[in-house]
């Protein structure tokens, strides 16, 4: 092949062709001018917009539906919402693995979008098909069992669809940028910001227009809108097929990890070489796909997997279960280094879990009238969170990043983990403000038990939603970038799944926390979680979460300061490995 010959002789026209192991829709080396970058990601962000519209149209009103239509009590409804949100954000681990190992990201997005669409169709049927409806009366005092079963099957089909859709689509969008091309690399750093901008636009319409239709017109009308939008965006995604860059899945990304571990254990008693250059690595000139990683000093026991014992035989022909390359060893280190950061971000996820449950339920207890008989649906207050995130992302991308780049010399402005830590400070502020507002609301209820807190405007909740939205612009976007960037190249769908699993695991922990606190406080006095909000003490619960995040932040800062970022060799002939993972040497 002419292009490949050019690579071997050092004559590649890198401005014309993209040589990062990707192919176009016909399996050829992509032309830079006609594939990838923003022309491709616009199609990808379009389907993400509709998916988030559908997801938040369902998620933000779920606790309202469970308490009003299915008539569950507050604790049961909150737990069911957390379980569903937990499954929805943990399923991407499975979907991401299938995308990276077998199907590829485009195919996984397509198949999961079809499942997602079928879930929305079933959800619509549960509202309109007479035998599947909750009941025949205007107000259901007790819904039919068949309606509950079909409803939960539908929303969990949406969970399965999200499981393949979320990790594959976001990483597929990031794949449209060539990291070995300086201009495209800078654009890629902006990609996650604008991805979340589009995501928040979908969220904003989901919690305003869709929720308003649910509240004023009916659940079925909203389901029809969501189904139609999802079907349309799937068609748009398919239309963009000629503009995408595709990465062929290399097989299970877990096998090389196991090979490194097996080789390191087998050679655990060998002496460590005095010079790391003696460790086995494939020569850069022989690598036509993928990237080499620089050796790091962390987790040195794994380096023994790259010690060459049999120098007489060609190292490349030796059993990969007994000899690994430095790059494979470093990829294993990357995965192990993720674990402490993943654990340290869980308390942040617990604070996020409250926005779709107790925050929304608080809105039902306040005055939502904004004049002229217009009443805001309880879930629509969530729009303030999306608004806070949209504004914060735009300011960060257009103002802060250019200033920080000049001040720090870092292409990102600040390091990824610093960005995540800043967002955690906002999450502490969110829980503190939430506790103070809830204490104020309970004080109003004490003074007027009959009218309750209906004399308080729903906009008392605005500060906590806006602050958490600003925090999300730092922490959630930072987590997306971190788990995409700091995993092996072959595991990037799984990397996005790791980010989503933070929120998923945090939802489950939030449910367990509610159960445990309910049991303990009920045993030694009055439970913090009563039959309704007026008999509960959510302010105590919010203070507890704020304290957990603050204590965890100390641990997180310690981990972030000691963290070693991914070191990649980008240059074609000679590569200098420096601490920030940026290569500046060219032959």
Image (tube, rainbow, N blue to C red):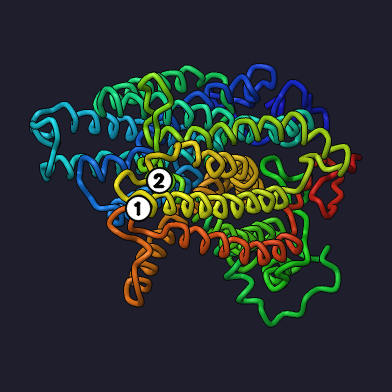
Whether residue 319 is visible to the viewer of this picture, yes or no, is no
Viewer-nearest residue: 536 or 233: 536
- Tell me: 581 left or right of 508: right
Residue behind mark 2: 362
Residue at 70% over, 47% down: 419
Comes first in the chain, label 2 or label 1: 2
If the image is split into quadrants, where does the C terminus sit?
Answer: top right
Circle 1 sits in a helix, a strand or a loop, which is it? helix
Viewer-nearest residue: 347 or 282: 347
Residue at 77% over, 51% down: 283
> Vertically, is 105 above or below 562?
above
Estimate the x, y position of residue 181 in percent, counting from the top left.
Answer: 76, 32
Among the 4 quarters of the image, the one containing residue 118: top left
> Residue furthest toward the front?
447
> Vertically, is 315 above or below 91?
below
- Tell me: 494 left or right of 138: right
Label 1 neighbour load within 10 Å: few <14, some 14-19, many 20+:
some
Estimate the x, y position of residue 158 in percent, counting from the top left.
Answer: 33, 39
Whole-number angstrom distance, CA of label 2 to CA of label 1: 7 Å
Estimate the x, y position of residue 27 in percent, counting from the top left.
Answer: 55, 27
Circle 2 sits in a helix, a strand or a loop, which is it? helix
Residue at 57% over, 44% down: 468
- Tell me: 427 left or right of 135: right
**Is disc 2 in contact with disc 1, using a CB cutoff of under 8 Å?**
yes
Viewer-nearest residue: 19 or 313: 19
Whether residue 530 is visible to the viewer of this picture, yes or no, is yes
Label 2 neighbour load within 10 Å: few <14, some 14-19, many 20+:
many
Residue behind mark 1: 533
Estimate the x, y position of residue 552 in percent, counting from the top left.
Answer: 61, 64
Question: Tag on residue 509?
Answer: none
């Amino acid at each position: 092949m002419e292009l490949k010959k050019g690579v071997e002789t050092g004559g590649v026209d890198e401005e014309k062709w993209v040589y990062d192991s990707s192919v176009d829709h016909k399996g050829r080396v992509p032309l830079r001018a006609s594939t990838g970058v923003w022309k491709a990601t616009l199609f990808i962000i379009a389907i993400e917009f509709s998916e988030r519209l559908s997801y938040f149209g369902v998620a933000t009103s779920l606790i309202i539906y469970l308490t009003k239509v299915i008539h569950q009590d507050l604790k049961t409804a909150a737990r069911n919402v957390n379980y569903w949100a937990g499954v929805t954000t943990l399923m991407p681990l499975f979907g991401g693995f299938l995308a990276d190992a077998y199907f590829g990201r485009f195919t996984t997005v397509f198949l999961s979008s079809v499942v997602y669409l079928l879930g929305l169709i079933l959800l619509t049927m549960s509202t309109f098909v007479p035998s599947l409806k909750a009941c025949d009366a205007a107000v259901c005092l007790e819904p039919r069992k068949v309606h509950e079963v079909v409803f939960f099957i539908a929303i969990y089909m949406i969970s399965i669809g999200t499981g393949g859709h979320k990790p594959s689509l976001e990483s597929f969008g990031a794949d449209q940028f060539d990291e070995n091309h300086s201009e495209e690399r800078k654009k890629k750093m902006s990609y996650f910001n604008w991805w979340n901008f589009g995501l928040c636009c979908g969220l904003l319409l989901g919690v305003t227009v869709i929720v308003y239709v649910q509240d004023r017109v009916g659940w079925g009308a909203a389901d029809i809108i969501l189904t139609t939008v999802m079907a349309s965006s799937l068609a748009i995604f398919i239309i963009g097929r000629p503009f995408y860059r595709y990465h062929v899945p290399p097989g299970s990304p877990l096998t090389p990890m196991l090979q490194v571990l097996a080789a390191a254990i087998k050679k655990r008693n060998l002496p460590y070489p005095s010079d790391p250059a003696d460790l086995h690595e494939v020569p850069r000139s022989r690598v036509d796909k993928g990237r080499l990683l620089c050796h790091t000093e962390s987790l040195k026991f794994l380096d023994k997997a790259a010690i060459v014992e049999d120098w007489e035989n060609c190292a490349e022909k030796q059993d990969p279960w007994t000899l690994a390359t430095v790059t494979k060893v470093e990829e294993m280190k990357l995965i192990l280094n993720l674990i402490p950061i993943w654990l340290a971000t869980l308390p942040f996820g617990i604070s996020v879990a409250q926005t779709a449950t107790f925050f929304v339920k608080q809105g039902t207890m306040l005055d939502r009238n904004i004049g002229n008989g217009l009443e805001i649906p309880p879930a629509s207050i969530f729009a303030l969170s999306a608004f806070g995130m949209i504004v914060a992302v735009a300011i960060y991308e257009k103002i802060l990043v250019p200033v920080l780049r000049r001040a720090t010399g870092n292409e990102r402005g600040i390091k990824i983990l610093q960005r995540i830590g800043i967002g955690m400070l906002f999450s502490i502020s969110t829980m503190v403000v939430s506790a103070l507002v809830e204490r104020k609301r309970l004080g109003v209820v004490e003074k007027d038990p009959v009218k309750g807190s209906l004399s308080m405007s729903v906009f008392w909740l605005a500060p906590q939603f806006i602050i958490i939205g600003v925090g999300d612009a730092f922490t959630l976007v930072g987590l997306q970038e971190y788990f995409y960037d700091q995993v092996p190249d072959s595991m990037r769908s799984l990397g996005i799944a790791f980010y989503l699993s933070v929120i998923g695991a945090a939802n489950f922990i939030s449910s367990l926390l509610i159960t445990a606190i309910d049991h303990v406080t009920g045993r030694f006095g009055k439970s913090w979680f009563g039959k309704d909000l007026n008999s509960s003490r959510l302010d105590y619960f919010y203070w507890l979460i704020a304290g957990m995040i603050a204590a965890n932040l100390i641990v997180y800062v310690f981990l972030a300061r000691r963290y070693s970022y991914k070191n990649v060799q980008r240059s074609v002939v000679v590569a200098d490995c420096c601490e920030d993972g940026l290569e500046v040497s060219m032959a």
